[in-house]
Image: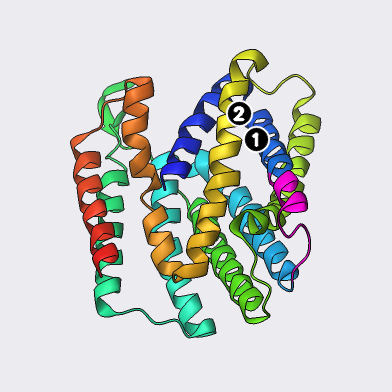
Amino acid sequence: MGLFAASSVAARQSIHHLGPNNASLVRILIATLLLGIYAHVWGAGFHGPALLWFLTSGFIGFGICDTALFLALPRLGAQLTSLMVQCLSVPISLLTEWLWLGTELTLSQLAAIGLVLVGVVIALWPRRAEPIALPGTPTARIAPPGPGAGALALGVVAAAGQAWGAVLSRHGTQLSLAAGHPIDGLSVAYQRIWAGVFFIALWWLWQRRRQGAGTSGVHPDWRAAWPWVLANALTGPSLGVACYQWALATRPTGIVMAVTALTPLAVIPLSWLLNGERPTPASVTGGVVGITGVIWLALG
């Protein structure tokens, strides 16, 4: 959770200097290079009995999830998108793993997960938008329209992609253990990330062709961006995903995803420290409730 939170802060700075498309592509290319060096020198490389499962997991978790997430963000806003993905992915993963793999959680674990999600909802629930005045009628005010069904569907697809990618990854890890060929988290992250490279590279090429070269909306400042890009690549898709895979190897998917659902809350103190963005009372309350749920899970 901490690594993903640091990655989110670094990603925001990278996007500020490079624009979203350049920052996303360079980040995942650097992460793939770093993971590849480890995987082919010390890790499993492209070997292992569950390679196909990990590639499929990356296709769904990186490709479908991230694409839907990217499309949902401008339509739903950051808060509602994060709320949908973080809160819906947990029950989807719990139900999927129960129906497919037979994983059952205790009532205490389910209650603790519910408390974590309540904290996320309190912190991320979008505040009511201020009414806007209609042109020519300064006294008549209406609220802006809510999100459409298509935008909400994108949020659901992103949540399902995140959940199913995690379940498939855990299943692949279990198969590797059963076959007597355990695979470490960094190697799993490397095998999974190739689907993300494929999707993001295609998206970057399509955007470049559609908008024209050099029209990314932000004039790239590579000198200022490199420290943030490296930090983003190292903390998120490299070490962050590796720790995530290690957790999936030892804990049910629903528990792991409930803990990582607190990532947006962990970003709050980092943003306060780096950018001076003071946390709201709702975010502080939600953070306390969510952390209480995680402590409950740990003690249970």
Q: Position of residue 19 (x, y in %)?
A: 62, 25
Residue that carries the numbered disc 2 in the rendered image: 229
Q: Nearer the viewer, residue 121 or 189?
A: 189
Q: Is residue 133 visible?
A: no
Residue 33's place in the image compared with 109, above or below, is above
Q: Is residue 85 visible?
A: yes
The stretch in magenta equals 35-48
Whichever of callouts 2 and 1 sits on the residue coming sooner in the sequence is: 1
Residue 270's place in the image compared with 121, above or below, is above
Give the left or right position of residue 73, taking residue 171 as reference. Answer: left
- Tell me how the rendering is colored: rainbow
Tag count in the figure?
A: 2
Q: Position of residue 151 (x, y in %)?
A: 51, 50
Q: Position of residue 200 (x, y in %)?
A: 71, 43
Residue 95's place in the image compared with 269, above or below, is below
Badge 1 element: helix
**Answer yes or no: do the residues labelled 2 and 1 have beta carbons within 8 Å?**
yes
Which residue is depicted at the point 38% across and 60% down? 258
Q: Picture quarter containing residue 266?
A: top left
Q: CA distance from mark 2 to mark 1?
A: 6 Å
Q: Mark 2 is on which residue type?
A: Val
Residue that carries the numbered disc 1 in the rendered image: 27
Which residue is depicted at the point 53% across and 64% down? 160
Q: Mark 1 is on which residue type?
A: Arg
Badge 2 element: helix
Which residue is depicted at the point 79% across and 22% down? 213
Residue 250 falls inside the magenta stretch: no
Q: Picture quarter containing residue 201?
A: top right
